[in-house]
Amino acid sequence: VTYNLTCGSNFSIDAGGELKGSCCGLQSGENLTATVVVVKPGFNNSSPASIVGQTRLSPVTNASIVWSSTYESVHVSWNASNSLNVQYSVTIGSNPTEELSETSTNQTGLSPGSVQSIDIIVKKAGFVDSLPAMSKALTKPRLNASSATFSTDFKLDAVTLANSALSAVWTSTVAIGADFLSIDLKSSKLNMNKKETFDKLKAEFKGEYAYSDNVTIEVVAVAEKDGLVQNSSGTYTVVQRT
């Protein structure tokens, strides 16, 4: 005798004399009936023997996860699972897990410049959960909680003409969640640029631009963690009475 195997509504497979067989190309995340009948030339087929089995849920792929962030929120989207009628269990950072039917979500109330883990699991009642899809997001650092132009927290020392120096001093609240700051000082009169990268709360710029009438300082706060980079920038214009 030989054996014919049928899975769900697919065409039957001739398994020959083997006592096992596989069905491919089935829909993921479904209950399917596997049926076996005994075949012999010149004889009617036997009564079918059958059993119900499940195909696994199709997971979300890591590569399909896309995120964007603000100072205190992360928006995440992903490609849908190939399985039908599923839910997505989404966890961002240490926040409560969400059960969603759509393929995007927004998490608020986060800290500036913080790394947020992303875990997405496909679920369906009566089925084993899929493997998790994982990624990481980074919120932007925040420059001055009340203003983007340092009008409150950013202060300039008096210009000392003797040593031609301009010092920029600010408080730590100007750059919340930043790992370092980048300064670009521009003098419109002398057309000179000066760039500095530092992690302190004071930067001193020496040179002829200290005598310029107008100096523009652009500050970029940079968060750099776990291979991710986010930044925020602001400008402050100084009118020097030299």
Image: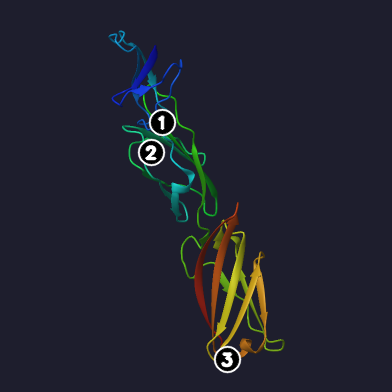
| Residue, disc 2 | 81
Q: Earlier in the sequence, mark 3 or mark 2?
A: 2
| Residue, disc 1 | 57
Q: Quadrant of residue 209?
A: bottom right
Give the tally of numbered discs.
3
List the single residue furthest toward the front.
42
Q: Is 86 drawn above or below residue 182 in the view shown?
A: above
Secondary structure, mark 2, is: loop
Q: Amino acid at mark 3?
A: Leu
Q: Amino acid at mark 2?
A: Ser
Identify the coloring: rainbow
Closer to the camera, 59 or 11?
11
Q: Residue at x 47, y 67 (%)?
A: 148
Residue 111, percent from left and from top: 51, 50
Q: Residue at x 44, y 16 (%)?
A: 17
| Residue, disc 3 | 190
Closer to the camera, 163 or 103?
103
Q: Amino acid at mark 1?
A: Leu
Q: Quadrant of residue 29?
A: top left
Q: How far apart are the alpha carbons under marks 2 and 1?
A: 8 Å
Q: How crowded is the residue under tag 2: few (<14 C-alpha within 10 Å), some, or many (20+)? A: many
**Comparing labels 1 and 3, the label whose residue is closer to the camera:** 1
Quick check: can you spot residue 67? yes
